[in-house]
Structure formats: structure tokens, C-alpha cells
Amino acid sequence: MKKIVLSLSVCSALSFGAGNEELVKEIELLKAQMKHMMQSQQKMATQQEKVVNEQKEEIKLIVRDQEVTNEAMLEEIYNASDDSTVKYESFSSLGEGASKVYHTNNAVSIGGYGEYKFKKYKDYKNTTSAAYNANKNKGEFNIVRFVPYIGYKFNDWIVMNTEIEFEDGGARSDDTKNYKYAIVEFSYLDFLIDKSFAIRIGHILTPFGLVNLNHEPTAYLTTDRPAVETFIIPSTWHTNGALVHGKIDDFEYYAGVITSPDADHFGDAEGRYIQQGRLGAKQYTDSLSFVARGTYDLGDGLNVGGSFMYGSSLGSSSNIEVKMTMLEAHATYQNNGFDIKALATVGTLDGDVAKLPTEGDIVVSDTVNGQYLTVGYDVLSHFELPHKGYLFAEVERLDMDVNSQTIYPDNNKFLEYTTGFSYFPDPKVTLKADYKLRDYGSSAKFADENSFTFAAGFIF
């Protein structure tokens, strides 16, 4: 710039002393120099702007890449720690919550289920105690069960699975008839050698019937578990043993050896078959039973199967030996809005049944049988709603004294009718309401029982 100013000054001076021709040449030269300098400066400015823009784009790409990386990292961390990515699907006929450990990539799995219930009887009078009857007629509010599952995967083929049950909201601390308790309902190791062959050892659920393996509240429509699978098949029936199990195409099986229930307690309550003889996790016994269960998926939601148990039970104190045999056959259909379950079972006791210890005038019956049918239909399926709501009806028949050996046989023979509605706002949550009538035999000393029940259940 100084050069240009100086040249202009020279030009002014020359204008007085030089000729016109020389003056014109000097001016043209100065103009050319000035033009060249301005073009160079403009070119440099353009290049600088280009460099700045390129740097801006590079910064944008770096920031964008970092954002994508951060988002991917957060998603990976979330998926690694969030069990919502786990499938809720039954494994080897277990409940969906109990199967959670089999469907996660995490080493540790936490699941569970719970039930809250309100029950109200109408004019209950089936005990000799007026005070007990009066109390029974009051509304019963109860946290029936809260059950956490804890699972652990040692590797891709060894699994530990445990259920801890808190029933009636408490724990039993004495030998009174306070049936609140906290127990380990199952705790086992599963060696998943192959899809078609696995070995399960520990404290296990006996593979028998429908409810015993899957007794989560979302698995059945009624507020209570079926009486057939409570009085005859003593759900929940858990004991120590070793099982092999697996799935071959559409056939699923269990077979193994379990410890037998204690025959000395079969007479603790009349009309309960082997239910009262169930043992806990710590056992002193030499009595064993064989059990097997098989189911076959016929497709389109139809599944059929059956179970078998045979064994002996030596009374823990009496040393009276009893042989036990139990069979069941079942079928389920879940398709086109229907949820249908049917089961029939029979149980027998052989040996010195009449010599078993009992309380009072209780008599142990040597033969029992029972059947039930549950039919539910999802009425909400017609409204294209994401929820499900089943209207259902269930009928059960129980004969807990087939050979009429008890003092009042008709006290141990009854029909049970249940109807109600089960709403699923989420597949893992259910709200149920039903009315139940228990209809005793004509010669029974018991009066028919009527009750209304509302229940809320969930798995997680």
C-alpha cells in the first residue's frame, strides 16, 4: 500500500514536469500494479475462506461421529443392563417368569411373580366352630404370594434357578396353624447338554399336570388354582430329586426320581390324598418315586400330554409302607381368541393304608379322581385392542373318596362351578374377578359354599 501511495505522489510530481506521453505510461503501469495486487489479495481471501469452511465441515463430522458413537454406547449399556430385552417365554413348561434365566444373555437374572386377593364368602358354616365360621364370612384381604426368582448362568450350558416364596405376607415361626411362611420352593442346577437332553438336580418342581410346573397367576384365568390340581395333584409340589428333560421336535419330556411324600401325614386332613405329606428341602427319607411327563404340540395352539408317578412311602415314624400311583391326562388349546384347558387325574394308595396315623376320626381314602374344564374367550379381540379380556367358565368334579371309606363320603365329593372375567392390560399383568359355587353331594354334612373373589397378579 505504501508503494502505491508513493507512486501516486511521484505521478503527481511528474504531471508538472514530464510530457503527456510519459505521464500516461506511468499511470497505466500503476493501474496494472494496483489491479494485480487487488486480485492477489482477493485470491488469498478466497483460499482462507475455503480453508475455514473445510475446517468447519471437519468439525461437524467429528461432532456427528461422536454423537453417533455416544448414542451407540448408551444403547449398548442400556441393552446390557435392561432385562426388558429378555423374552418372556416358557422353557420346559415352566412359568414365563421362572424361565427368564434361560432367555437372557446376562449372567444374573431377577424375576418373580405376585398375587393380591380379596375373597368374600356368603354364609359359610362348614366347621363346628361358630367363631371360625363368623371369621370366615368376613372379607379376606391378603398378599397371597410374593415370589422372587434368582437365576445365574455359569456358562452357556449350566444354569442355576431358584424360587423363594413368601406366602400370606409372612413367615411361620412356630408349630401352630399359622400358615404364613417363607420357603425355597425350588433351587436346582440345570445341565443343558443338548436341546433334546438335559439333567436337572436339586430341589425341583415335580413334573406333573399343568399347574405344578407353571403356577404363575398369568397362566390360568381363575382367581384360584383348580381344586383338582390342589387336592389331588398337590400343587405346588416341590421335592428333592434328579430329572432328565428335553425337547425332540414337537415332543417335550421329563423323567426322573424324586423323594416321596411322608405317608404318616396323609391323614392330617381328610380328602387331600397325598397333599399333606409333602416334604421341604431338608429331608430324612429312604422313600423314592419315579415320575414322568410328556407333552406333544399338535400345532395351531393345540397341545396334549400326560404324567405318571409311582413310588413307595415309608412313614417317618410309623414305618408303615404305602404304594402310590397317580396318572393324569391333559389338553390345552390357545388360538382364535380361545383359552381352553382340560385335565383328568386318578390316584391310588396300596398297602397298609388303614393303619396310617390320623387325627380324630379322619379316614384316609385309598382312591381319588378328579377332572376339570376351563373355557375362556377373549371378548376384546373383536375390538382390535392391544389388551386381552377373557370371559371364562370352569367346572370341576372331585371325588376324594371313590370307595366311600370315610364316615361321610359325600363330604369328600363335590362339583365346583366358577365364572368370571380376567383382564390382561399387559401380558405380564392380570386383574381377575369371579364367582364360585362348591356343590356338595346330597348326603353331605357340609353346606354348599358361595364366594366372590377379586385378584391382581403379575410376573416380572
Image: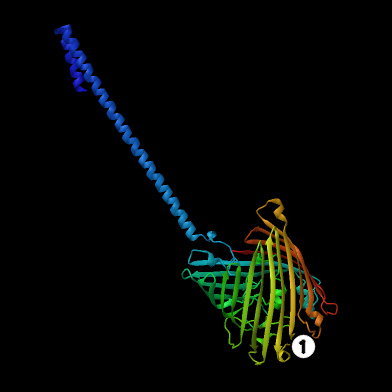
Q: In this view, does 396 lie above or below 339?
A: below
Local SS, label 1 = loop
**Residue 11 % position (x, y):** 18, 13
Q: Which colour scheme is used?
A: rainbow
Residue 249 showing in the rendered view: yes
Q: Going by the picture, which residue comes out furthest to the left?
A: 17
Q: In this view, does 161 lie above or below 409?
A: above
Q: Identity of the amino acid at label 1? A: Asp
**Residue 276 % position (x, y):** 68, 82
Q: Which is nearer the eye, 45 or 344?
A: 344
Report which quarter residue 315 is drawn in. Answer: bottom right
The residue beneath circle 1 is 361
Q: Is residue 280 above or below residue 59?
A: below
Q: Going by the picture, which residue comes out furthest to the right?
A: 442
Report which quarter residue 145 is drawn in. Answer: bottom right
Residue 183 showing in the rendered view: no
Report which quarter residue 128 is drawn in. Answer: bottom right
**Residue 191 % position (x, y):** 51, 74
User: Which quarter of the rendered picture does the C terminus lie within?
Assistant: bottom right
Q: Which residue is drawn at 57% across and 74% down?
A: 245
User: Which quarter of the rendered picture does the N terminus lie within?
Assistant: top left
Q: Residue at x 57, y 67 (%)?
A: 99
Left-right relation of 11 to 81: left
Left-right relation of 371 to 298: right
